[in-house]
Image (tube, grey):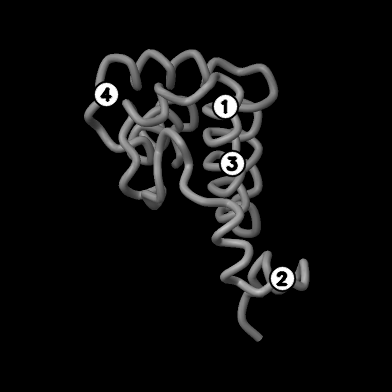
């Protein structure tokens, strides 16, 4: 069975949900792979942190079954008080035209050697 849409789960027709949400005021409807560091830097701090936490959590989930120690490293370094957020913020500000996903990966690689 395929992945169910949020609209389906909520019992809403997809057109209604899409019309109600609209476009994001800062990043529009760009997919994550097209977001640049500059786009994320224009987000409010809490929204930017939520995006980064989501990217790191997803990365940790992808590697968790085969390499739980690496998943733990990612979570510890970014989310549980490590220096990941500080380093990522510096990289994003230094390279605003780079893709945000690439920056997250590069900074994660600095913190978790086995990535």
Q: Earlier in the sequence, mark 3 or mark 4?
A: 3
Seen in the picture, residue 18 relative to 108 is either above or below; the reply is below
Give the residue at mark 2.
Answer: 12
Labels 1 & 4 near each other (Cβ < 8 A) = no
Q: Is residue 56 left or right of residue 65?
A: left
Q: Which-is-in-front pick, marks 1 and 2? A: 2
Mark 2 vs mark 3, foreground winner is 2
Residue 87 place in picture, x, y as percent: 44, 16
Residue bearing mark 4: 96
Q: Which residue is mark 1?
A: 49
Q: Secondary structure at mark 4?
A: loop
Q: CA distance from mark 2 to mark 4?
A: 38 Å
Q: Residue at x 58, y 51 (%)?
A: 21
What's the distance in space between the residues labelled 2 and 3, CA to CA? Answer: 25 Å
Cβ atoms under marks 2 and 4 closer than 8 Å: no
Say which mark, if any, is on residue 54: 3
Q: Residue furthest right?
A: 10
Numbered circles on residues, count:
4
Residue that protrudes farthest toward the left in the picture: 97
Decide if residue 98 is on the left or right side of residue 85: left
* Callout 4 crowding tier (Cα within 10 Å): few <14, some 14–19, many ≥20: some
């Amino acid at each position: 069975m395929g992945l169910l849409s949020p609209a389906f789960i909520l019992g809403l027709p997809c057109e209604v949900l899409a019309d109600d949400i609209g476009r994001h005021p800062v990043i529009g409807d760009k997919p994550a792979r097209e977001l640049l560091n500059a786009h994320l830097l224009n987000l409010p701090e809490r929204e930017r942190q939520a995006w980064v936490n989501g990217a790191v959590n997803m990365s940790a989930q992808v590697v968790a079954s085969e390499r739980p120690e690496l998943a733990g490293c990612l979570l510890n370094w970014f989310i549980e008080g490590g220096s990941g957020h500080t380093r990522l913020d510096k990289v994003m500000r230094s390279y605003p035209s780079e893709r945000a996903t690439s920056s997250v990966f590069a900074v994660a690689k600095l913190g978790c050697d086995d990535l």
